Image (spheres, helix red, strand yellow):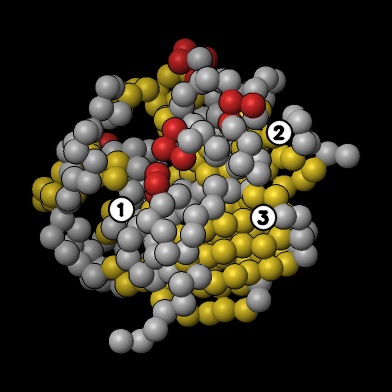
């Protein structure tokens, strides 16, 4: 059996990153030695999907069933408390490292047709560090099959101010609307963020506020979510251009980081059809995001 590297270490300027083949995951990112995401050991099974790539759907499929072009499909339910199929099919697959340099790595995975998702895709995830721009992540998926494929993408980094409790940090997001959910986290309707007390204006520390919601009504030309530590002046930012954004206050990681997940579609898009990407044979789709940091003088 061929050996696979447990991790790929990247560096550029004051930035360093660790990428693991399992789930094409981001296992660490730092700036001047300060942690910008919740890290995990390369051989660790991390809680809360830390750093994983989410394809061919992000978030959840309610009940693990969906209908596409007249055919009902069933995928495995992996969160039985809510009866949902979470985060796609690639989180725990071992991706192949196909390109590598001191500051750049590309991982690739072929998603073969299977019961519940009889579509044939090839996904590539690129991580590129730049001394000025920080870490750019691009998820590119190509339909290499013969049928149109329903598709969505995201990634699951937990922004962190060097491990500071998120209760003490200031979270800012430009999203004006949020998807309300029921007790099983299944989607209900989009409402103003203010209706749920989830306007994240960045004017005060997060405190004990608990969040696990998909946000929308975001700037179409791109947006930024930031997490700042008023004590040290460290600010971590995630920049993306996507219609949806999942924010989770990180209870599964001890509230030492906030999951900030740009999503191409909302939860249960395979059923609702909202912002669902439909990849024609030969067509490709890319989701790109960037994480950087500054420290106030």
Looking at the rendered image, the quarter that the C terminus falls into is top right
> Mark 3 to mark 2: distance in Å?
15 Å
- Please tell me the numbered disc located at residue 260: none
Asked which secondary structure carries label 1, the reply is: loop
Residue at the image position 36 percent from the left and 86 percent from the top: 2
Q: Residues within 10 Å of mark 2 (few under 14, many from 20)?
A: many
- Please tell me the numbered disc located at residue 30: 3
Q: Residue furthest bottom?
A: 1
**Front of the two marks 1 and 3:** 3
Disc 1 designates what residue? 88
Q: In the visual, does 39 lie left or right of 86?
A: right
Residue at the image position 43 percent from the left and 19 percent from the top: 191
Q: Position of residue 75 (x, y in %)?
A: 17, 51
Label located before the other in sequence (2 or 1): 1
Q: Position of residue 252 (x, y in %)?
A: 41, 37
> Mark 2 to mark 1: distance in Å?
33 Å
Residue 240 visible in the picture: no
Residue 21 picture quarter: bottom left
Please, is residue 283 above or below residue 290 in the view? below
Q: Residues within 10 Å of mark 1 (few under 14, many from 20)?
A: many
Label located before the other in sequence (1 or 3): 3
Q: Are marks 3 and 2 in contact (CB under 8 Å)?
A: no
Disc 2 designates what residue? 229
């Amino acid at each position: 059996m061929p050996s696979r590297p447990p991790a790929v270490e990247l560096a550029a300027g004051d930035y360093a990153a660790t990428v693991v083949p399992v789930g094409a995951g981001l296992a660490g990112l730092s700036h001047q030695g300060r942690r910008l995401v919740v890290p995990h050991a390369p051989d660790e099974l991390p809680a809360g999907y830390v750093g994983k790539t989410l394809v061919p759907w992000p978030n959840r499929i309610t009940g693990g069933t969906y209908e596409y072009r007249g055919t009902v499909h069933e995928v495995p339910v992996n969160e039985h408390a809510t009866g949902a199929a979470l985060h796609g099919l690639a989180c725990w697959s071992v991706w192949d490292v196909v390109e590598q340099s001191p500051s750049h790595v590309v991982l690739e995975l072929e998603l073969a047709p299977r019961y519940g998702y009889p579509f044939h895709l090839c996904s590539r995830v690129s991580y590129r560090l730049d001394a000025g721009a920080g870490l750019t992540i691009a998820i590119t998926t190509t339909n290499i099959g013969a049928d149109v494929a329903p598709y969505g993408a995201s990634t699951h980094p937990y922004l962190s101010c060097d491990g500071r409790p998120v209760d003490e940090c200031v979270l800012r997001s430009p999203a004006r609307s949020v998807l309300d959910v029921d007790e099983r986290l299944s989607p209900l309707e989009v409402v103003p963020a203010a209706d749920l007390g989830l306007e994240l204006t960045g004017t005060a520390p997060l405190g004990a506020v608990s969040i696990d919601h998909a946000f929308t009504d975001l700037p179409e030309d791109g947006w930024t979510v930031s997490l700042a530590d008023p004590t040290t002046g460290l600010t971590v930012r995630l920049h993306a251009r996507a219609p949806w954004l999942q924010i989770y206050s990180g209870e599964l990681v001890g509230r030492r980081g906030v999951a900030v997940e740009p999503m191409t579609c909302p939860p249960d898009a395979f059923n609702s059809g909202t912002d669902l990407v439909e990849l024609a044979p030969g067509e490709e789709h890319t989701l790109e995001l960037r994480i950087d940091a500054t420290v106030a003088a």
